[in-house]
Image (spheres, helix red, strand yellow):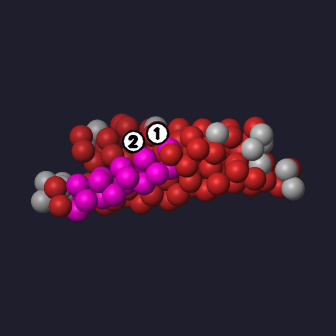
Amino acid sequence: MPKTFISLGAMNAFLCVLLGAFGAHGLKHKLSPDMLIIFQTGVEYHFYHAFGLIMIGLILLHFSKAKLIILSGWLMLAGIIVFCGSLYGISLTGTRELGMLAPLGGLSLISAWGLLTYGVWKNN
C-alpha cells in the first residue's frame, strides 16, 4: 500500500502542476476573475492533498497494516476527486450546481485527516 499512495500522490502533484499552469496561462483571459479564483482554489487544495497522499504512503512504510491509515488515504483521494473536481467543474462550465458536491468532498478530506490522526495515534 505505501507504493500505491506515494504513486497516487505523485500523480496528483503532477496533475496540480499541469492544472496550475493551464489556469495561469490558458484560462487567465478566458475565465472571469471569480471563476479563476475558484479554479485556483481547486488547484491549491489539490496540491495540499497530493502531498497528503504521499505522506500517507510514507507513514504506511512504518505502519504497514494500519487499516485506518489506509482508509484515510482512500478518503483523501475521494476528497480530491469530489471537492477539487467540483471546483474545476464550476469554474470551467459555470455550472454552480456542482457546488453541492463540494461539501461532500470537503467532509471526505476532513475525515481523511481525522482518521490519519487517530490511525497513527492508535498504532503508537
Side of 116 where 102 appears, left or right: left
Decide which of 122, 106 is in the foreground and name it.
122
Q: Which amino acid does label 1 sit on?
A: Val
Magenta stretch secondary structure, dominant? helix
Q: Please state the horizontal and vertical placement of residue 57, each as a whole percent of the image.
A: 62, 49
Q: Is disc 1 in contact with disc 2, using a CB cutoff of under 8 Å?
A: yes
Q: What crowding class fits label 1: few (fewer than 14 Cα within 10 Å), some (14-19), or many (20 or more)?
A: many
Is 16 rendered above or below residue 3? below
- The residue carrying mark 2 is 86
State the SS at label 2.
helix
Chain part drawn in magenta: 8-24
Looking at the image, can residue 78 be seen?
A: yes
Residue 4 coordinates in the image, percent (x, y): 57, 40
Mark 1 highlights which residue? 82
Task: Report x, y in % for residue 29.
Answer: 12, 59
As measured in the structure, the alpha-carbon distance from the residue carrying label 1 to the one carrying label 2 is 6 Å
Q: Does the magenta stretch include residue 22?
A: yes
Residue at left offset 43%, top offset 48%: 12
Q: Can residue 103 be seen in this view?
A: no
Labelled disc at residue 15: none
